[in-house]
Amino acid sequence: MKKIASSELVLNSDNSVYHLNLHPHQIAKDIIVVGDPGRVETISNYFDNIEHKVANREILTHTGTLNGKQLTVMSTGMGPDNIDIVLNELDALVNIDLENRTIKEEHTTLNIIRLGTSGSLQKDVPVDSFVISELGLGLDGLMNYYEYNQTDEEIELLNQFYSQTNYNKVFAQPYFVKGSFELFNKLKEGCISGITATAGGFYGPQGRVLRIPLKETQLNEKLRDFKHNNHVILNFEMETSALYGLSRALGHNACTICAIIANRFSGTVSTNYKLAVKNLIEETLSKLTQ
């Protein structure tokens, strides 16, 4: 079997994967990912015990057990570029023999749940509610670099998106990708479900103007008004489409749930978003460990 070159799969001197600084035995098969490193301890404080704590750059990893179930919680930092690193290295931990640098014959599937915060694009999705992402809409362009299978539904959604929005061709080609059916059904109770748009940045890519004029001044309005077969775009953030696309390509299950901390069209902001995030964490941990 062909070995993966050291320049392609970079390992540390102790044979841990480069950015995560982790060994295979230090992660569970059920992994919660968050953007903020500070939120890792907030979640792991609920664990009955913690077996591993590893920190490298913005990536903090705690692995332990809750109600007899092993869980990992990990920070990714912000943006689809960080998701690209984290997902590829998580997959390497379970599906590549790091000692021999060869792909394992038996595939291991991870369950990856993103808990985040987000802004709503629909007036009827209020602050402090929870949105579960049935699909991701990638405006980030990441998955254009990878070969992966898209469904007829995803292709039709993209065609409709171009038709309805006249999306600017100077931007990266968008893509739609569905999350895990299994995780969606397990976690959807108490959540509003729909499409989550993923941007490659926080300001211009999400229609915010400070000092630089935008090439597309009606982006959020176009996203808000898009509709096809009862699919609407509910919220805007920076990770979900990359998480869903890479999980699809690598054979993992992924699901995102975000607490809505601001509504871009009603102009409202959560007065206590930390409480909303706390409630989201508690509800998700309960569903995962039932």
Image: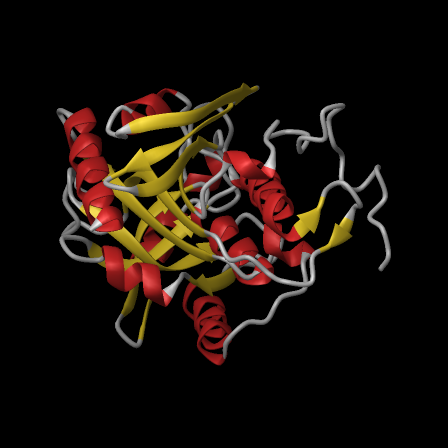
Of residues 142 and 66, the one drawn nearer to the viewer in this rendering = 66
Q: Position of residue 49 (x, y in %)?
A: 31, 27
Q: Position of residue 113 (x, y in %)?
A: 37, 47
For the point 16% across and 30% down, the residue is 270
97 with respect to 69 (left or right): right
From the viewer's perspective, is residue 156 above or below residue 173?
Answer: below
182 with respect to 37 (left or right): left
- The image quadrant where one finds the N terminus is bottom right
Q: Position of residue 46 (x, y in %)?
A: 24, 29
10 with respect to 221 (left or right): right
For the point 36% across and 41% down, the residue is 70
| Quarter of the figure with residue 268 | top left
Q: Residue furthest front?
A: 68
Of residues 69 and 85, the one drawn nearer to the viewer in this rendering = 69
Asked whether residue 263 is in view, the answer is: no
Q: State how the image is colored.
A: secondary structure
Count the marks: how many?
Answer: 0
For the point 47% across and 77% down, the residue is 156
From the viewer's perspective, is residue 134 above or below residue 35?
Answer: below
From the viewer's perspective, is residue 198 above or below residue 25?
Answer: below
For the point 80% across and 45% down, the residue is 100
Of residues 28 and 250, the one drawn nearer to the viewer in this rendering = 28
Asked whether residue 152 is in view, the answer is: yes
Q: Position of residue 89 (x, y in %)?
A: 62, 41
